[in-house]
Amino acid sequence: MASTDKHGDTEYRTSSSTPAPAGVDYFKFDVILRFVLFAASLVAVVVIVTGNQTEVILVPQPVPWPAKFRYTPAFVYFVAALSVTGLYSIITTLASLFASNKPALKTKLLLYFILWDAVINPINRFFHLAIHLLFSN
């Protein structure tokens, strides 16, 4: 007669020899992207602020005229928007680094990052659009 004992089958073993795969941790990638955001904002602010150009205006005699970012309101707003972006990236990078060691905070903080990124992004787009509209004549 056939045995009804199923303990010998590999299908009914309760212990597994391979552990379950761990989930992918995207917080390291998040920190890297936020650092790149800070670096790009910093470079853009430094280039705009330290730019030293001279435009030659043709009146009866050619006159050199300095062009600074402070002379154009769009560039002042551009520097302000990039400064806000840089500050935001510093704060969120530090928050990501802090939360990467605490798994209980990761999901909650990721939701907050999505919400705050959705708020900050249109603000930056507004400043970039304002600059584009002022200089697209």
Image (spheres, rainbow, N blue to C red):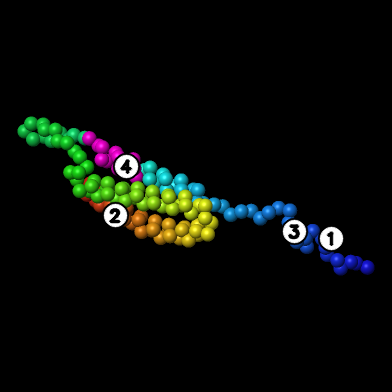
Classed neighbour count for the residue bearing mark 4: other residues with Cα under 10 Å, few (<14), some (14–19), many (≥20): some
Name the residue located 32 percent from the left edge and 42 percent from the top edge: 44
For this orientation, the residue located farthest to the right is 1
Check if mark 2's residue and mark 4's residue have beta carbons within 8 Å: no
Element marked by disc 2:
helix
Identity, as a three-letter code, of the amino acid under mark 1: Gly
Where residue 79 appears, as percent x and y from the top left, is 27, 46
Q: Are marks 2 and 1 in contact (CB under 8 Å)?
A: no
Name the residue type under label 3: Ser
Rendered residue at 42%/49% (across/down):
93
Q: Earlier in the sequence, mark 2 or mark 4?
A: 4
Dot label at residue 126: 2
| Mark pair 4, 1: CA separation | 68 Å
Say which amino acid is labelled 2: Phe
> In the image, which disc is placed on residue 44?
4
Residue 54 found in image quarter:
top left
| Residue 132 appears in view | no
Q: Nearer the viewer's eye, disc 3 or disc 1? A: 3
Numbered circle sitting on residue 53: none
Dot placed on the residue nearer the N-terminal end, 2 or 1: 1
The boundaries of the magenta stretch are 41-52
Disc assigned to residue 8: 1
Q: Which one is nearer the viewer's eye here, 100 or 45?
A: 100
Residue 63: x %, y % from top left: 11, 33
Query: Does 45 appear above or below 54?
Result: below
Q: CA distance from mark 3 to mark 2?
A: 58 Å
* Residue 116 image point, x, y percent: 39, 58
